[in-house]
Amino acid sequence: MSTSVRGGQLARLLGHWHSLPGRHRSPDYVALAGAVRGLLADSRLPLGVRLPAERELAGALGISRTTVTAAYRSLRESGHLTSRRGAGSWTTLPAGHRVTSSGLWTPDDDVGMIDMGVAASAAPIELVPAARAAADDLPRYLGSAGYHPTGLPDLRDAVAANYTGRGVPTSAEQILITSGTQQALDLVLRLSVPVGAQVLVETPTYPNALAALAARRARLTTHGLDVADGWDGELLLGALRQVRPRLAYVIPEFQNPTGHLMPAGLRERLVAAAHTTGTELVVDESFVDLALDDREMPPPVAVFDRHSRVVSIGGMSKAYWGGLRIGWIRASAPLVQRLAALRVGVDMASPVLEQLVAVHLLADAATIVAERRGQLRFRRDTLATALGEMLPEWRFVTPAGGVMVWAELDGPISSALARAAEDVGVRLAPGPRFGMDGTLERFIRLPFTLSPEDLTEAVRRIASVRHDLDHVSRTGWRTPAVIA
Ligand SMILES: Cc1ncc(COP(=O)(O)O)c(C=O)c1O
């Protein structure tokens, strides 16, 4: 099933298509077709979406139908639109264009490489004392087999208390401890997404979530986030209502990779819409602890859930340490039992020692998270300053939290830039990694989890190779591009 975009919605997305920079004396239909290609290239208009009828779009844009007809013809000729008589016209990509999003980025495979492919921090200094205290606790557990498929009771209590403290009353029975947030997502998908089921995802989004969805052979519908404004509530809810997906996956806090924070009003409307459409809402709270500015956080999405539509997943990788591999699922107690039964077929249970370390770290959460936030705030500002000085033509919204900047480049060069940066010792995750169809070439994700020195040096090296790419990308600002 495909979604359709209405004339008014497309007109809003197209914005000032008429006067985009770089337009000289081209006819209107060329500008219109170019603007639609631009929306596709930036993933703001998903693939497979049905465009409005020519007459409807002409009306919404206040232009002649002939112009829209010519623009659609041009889009068909370039492979960006497929039409069938009586059925309408769908967005497509020219034949053969595709970029997969399941790249593996490992932190330690090159000594000397500044690795900006991974958006996670080194361990806090509290980790070793917590591990010592956990080792002291261990004898209490050694008399049993050590398998706890739902997690150690003390850790489930601590995680449940955390949710309750955030305004979502939660009992330990509602918590399943997992091997990281990634396993939490995988388990939920295994249980809830039969092969071929429709799933709604944001684009751009976290690449390993796309990999987990690909493993379920889910059919994906996307909602494109705007680089400056984030979610478009009307389009997001519209897509939900049209597709009625089995499941929707969202990252409402400091979204990976855009850094946006979903406002409270949209959270509430999203839960209500999911209830109406029978959609399970999987909310990835990986970055929820990492607000970097003083403004008040919106309530957790689960606050608005009165019908057990929301499954929250989270973990300790971002505020504490990824190497712990501790994550969790918050769901109804019966669902937790079903997920635990499924989990036993995958890895039996999480390691006891790591869970004990997690209990000690969570007991010290106030200190550890405050330190982490202070560190990330400084690093975010260091990265922003370095970008402003050395790559002033790149644009980005300074995120209010999380660990990354989503920068809009001065051309469709992201993959080429990542390749060139590798040669000077910087690993980057290019924009197309965060989408599904080879778009997002004008964006790059820049985490600020490394030391300030490394961040500044990385930007210096990136700026040095950016200059050399000009012959590769003669296309200018705002020119749409599709990379194979
Ligand atoms: C949005 C999101 N979800 C899940 C994960 C995976 O986290 P974990 O290390 O807890 O498995 C990450 C890590 O980058 C992430 O950014």
Image: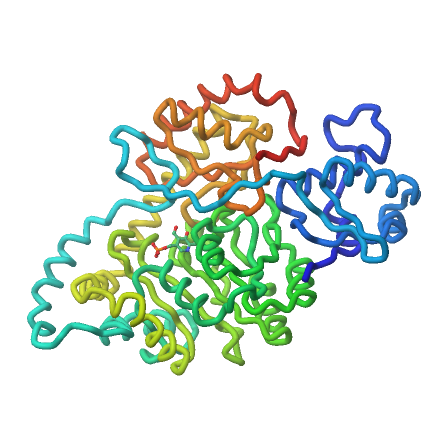
Residue closer to the observer: 201 or 404? 201
Q: Position of residue 152 (x, y in %)?
A: 22, 73
As drawn, 468 above or below 234 = above
Locate ligand 1 by image quadrant. Answer: bottom left
As drawn, 141 above or below 385 = below
Q: Please give left or right for residue 265 compared with residue 359 in the image.
A: right
* Residue appearing at x 49%, y 55% in the figure: 214
Name the quarter where the N terminus is drawn.
bottom right
Q: Please give left or right for residue 149 compared with residue 17 in the image.
A: left
Q: Please give left or right for residue 15 compared with residue 54 in the image.
A: left
Q: Position of residue 271 (x, y in %)?
A: 57, 71
Q: Quadrant of residue 348?
A: bottom left
Q: Please give left or right for residue 117 compared with residue 321 in the image.
A: right
Residue closer to the observer: 444 or 299? 444
Q: How many marks?
A: 0
Residue closer to the observer: 44 or 294? 44
Name the quarter where the C terminus is drawn.
top right
Work out which residue is located at the far bottom of the displayed protein and give it. 334
* Residue appearing at x 36%, y 40% in the figure: 378
Colour approach in the figure: rainbow
* Residue appearing at x 32%, y 54% in the figure: 317
Q: Position of residue 415 (x, y in %)?
A: 50, 32
Q: Position of residue 209 (x, y in %)?
A: 45, 55
* Residue appearing at x 44%, y 19% in the figure: 464
As drawn, 237 above or below 425 = below
Q: Quadrant of residue 235?
A: bottom right
